[in-house]
Structures are given as structure tokens and as C-alpha cells.
Image (spheres, rainbow, N blue to C red):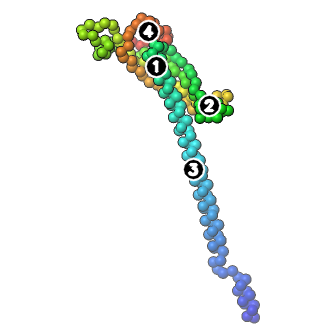
Amino acid sequence: MRSRSAHAARRRPAHGAGTAYLATLLAMVVLTILGLSVALSSQTEMQIGKNELTLQRVFYASDSGVSLATARALVDRDFSPIEFSIDDPDLAPFLAGRHRISISRYLEVNRQFCDLCDAANYGAHHVEEVWDLTFLLTSVASRRLGVDETEIAAKTLSTMMEFQPMKDSASMQLQLLEKNEGTVIRP
């Protein structure tokens, strides 16, 4: 009989024998969920970083449009609108990434005689009239991908430019009127 009770005691599991297995399984499930959430979070953060980089590039492309328009206005007296594209060298050639920049024409919003400009002051007499001119300019840049040029980001940059001193020549005035289609605003 004794052998029977020893045999029965061996068959019965101890009261806490399966808890270690369950605790280990539960810990593995919790750690797996934690690892997956960290992976998903880091993937989301990387995508946010890529989007922010794209928006910064588009902003700087728009800013380069303003710089180009300013250079054209100062050097060539060209106040006309312009559109151009810049290829993205960071992308593979099959993606055909590019920035397309569209610059509005200069709109004159203020014109006043430049009394304090050094070029205008030659003693008590003015040799030629020079002006302090203020213009409004808008540059729109977009980033496009692929052959069909799908737009993935766009930024608009509007700015007011003040040019002083600027000589008031008849040809420049006519050019401004033609480029602005007669929308010169005078004070």
C-alpha cells in the first residue's frame, strides 16, 4: 500500500508547478508587444523625419526662386514671371525627382522718392531722381516624383522686396507697367 501512495504522490503535480511556465509565457508576450510597439514607433518617427526633410527642401527651393527673381530684377531689370525645374540628385534616376518653381511677376506696391539715398544726394542738387520701390513677389515650389510628376509636397513663399536706390527711367516704368499689366499701385 505504501508503494501505491508514493506512486499517487508522484502523479499529482505540486500546487505551484505550472506557474513558472505561465509567468515565462506572459513575460514573452509582454516583451514581444513592447518590441513591436518600439519598432512601429521608430518607423513612424523615421517617416516624419523624411517628410520634414522633404518640406525643408521644398522651402529652400522656393527661397532659391525668390533669390533668382531678385537677381534678375537687379541685374537685368527683368520683373517678369518665370518657371524652372531643379532635378533632385539624391534620388535614383528611375524616380525622376525634381523641384518645380514658379515665380510670380513683381507687383509694385509702394513708390517714394528716396531723399536719404546717398546716390540721390549730391550736395543741395539732385542729379537724377532715384526711388525707394517696394514690390510683392510670390514663389511657389513643389516636389514631384516619377514620370507623371506626382506632387508630393508644395510650399508658397511670399515676400516684399524693397529696392533702393533705383533709378526711375522711362523704359523701366514702361516695363513695369507691361509686366504688371497696368496694376502699378502708387501711394
Label 3: element kind: helix
Distance CA(mark 2)–CA(mark 4): 38 Å
Mark 4 and mark 3 lie on one chain; the one further toward the N terminus is 3
Residue at image point 53% right, 25% down = 140
Residue at image point 48% right, 17% down = 72
Mark 2 and mark 3 lie on one chain; the one further toward the N terminus is 3
Q: Which residue bears the numbered disc 2?
A: 97
Distance CA(mark 4)–CA(mark 1): 16 Å
Q: Which residue bears the numbered disc 4?
A: 172
Q: Is residue 169 left or right of residue 18?
A: left
Mark 2 and mark 4 lie on one chain; the one further toward the N terminus is 2
- Which tag is nearer the camera, tag 3 or tag 1? 1
Label 2: element kind: loop
Q: Which residue bears the numbered disc 3?
A: 41
- Which tag is nearer the camera, tag 4 or tag 3? 4
User: Looking at the figure, which quarter contains the C terminus?
Assistant: top left
